[in-house]
Amino acid sequence: MSVPFPIQSDDRPSYGSGRWLQVRASTASAEIVSQIRQRLFDGQLKPGDFLGTESSLSQEFGVSRITLRDALRILEANGIVYVKVGKSGGVRVAEPNPERFADALAVQLMLAGITEKEVFDAQMGAEMRAAELAAENADADDLAALDAQFERCAAAVDDQEGFARESLNFHLQLIRSSHNRALLAQFHALRHVSSKAILRSHTPARARTVLERHRKTLAAVRARDAVSAAAGIREHFEQVIGALLARSRKANESPP
């Protein structure tokens, strides 16, 4: 017998002896999606939970298998469930995949026409906090990874494209060292949008300036100095944004 999920509010409808409310045919697939999403946000579902087979779920929701499949396609596309076919198959809550979220957010940022300055402003805020957390949370493995990535940056300082790539990876390792998964997902999304602008802005002379800032940030993280670590990131991004605005002004002033 199915065990009802707990209801967290008195004004929510009773589920009776089943887990799911039966739905109206005209909005059936949308209502199925809504119910499962709501259970997830209410904390009543967790990654890997078995929701049932296609047959059992269609009966519980009171819909045809075709309608249920429509809902499952939407839920799969949004990374909420995954469906395994075959004898031991069924529908389960999906495992987390921050990279999937990051890619989807990057697409939406591009479609919305978010400017490079907006992206860098957001990235500066996220990385300043990440630097503070890295100074507090970085363990020996994190520090070793930061050291190794800094050396890769130093080795690529005369290679414009290579340095831009390794510098971004230094920022990535700094975020990882914060041990904050939300900041990591945000970084991946913003990096998709900002990487081309970063590549355009790098020159060998500027690379050496950036490398020195990385050195100071790393030293601050090692010293557990959260204030200095965040200040180094702020200084870095303020220069990046300044260079971006100067390039934009120059382009606007150029004769047609």
Image (cartoon, helix red, strand yellow):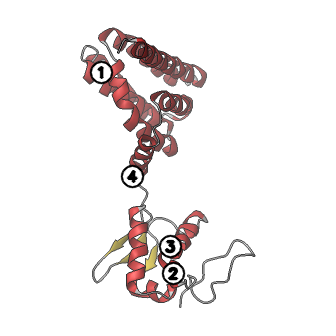
Residue 76 - label: none
Q: Give the mark nearer the N terminus: 4 vs 1.
A: 4
- Please state which of residues 101 and 88 is positioned toward the viewer in this rendering: 101
Q: Is residue 175 above or below residue 205?
A: below
**Crowding near the residue tagged with mark 4, few <14, some 14–19, many ≥20 C-alpha atoms within 10 Å:** some
Image side of residue 43 versus residue 201, left or right? right
Q: On the image, numbered disc 2 is attached to which residue? A: 26
Badge 2 marks a residue whose secondary structure is helix
Q: On the image, numbered disc 4 is attached to which residue? A: 100
Which amino acid type is marked by label 1? Answer: Phe
Q: Give the mark nearer the N terminus: 2 vs 4.
A: 2
Judge depth for marks 3 and 2 and give the one in front: 2
Name the quarter where the C terminus is drawn: top left
C-alpha gap between disc 4 and disc 1: 26 Å
Badge 3 marks a residue whose secondary structure is helix
Q: At which x and y percent is residue 80?
A: 45, 64
**Crowding near the residue tagged with mark 1, few <14, some 14–19, many ≥20 C-alpha atoms within 10 Å:** many
Which amino acid type is marked by label 4? Answer: Arg
Q: In this view, does 186 lie above or below 79?
A: above
Residue 207, by quadrant, is top left
Which amino acid type is marked by label 3? Answer: Ala
Residue 163 - label: 1
Q: Residue at x 38, y 15 (%)?
A: 211
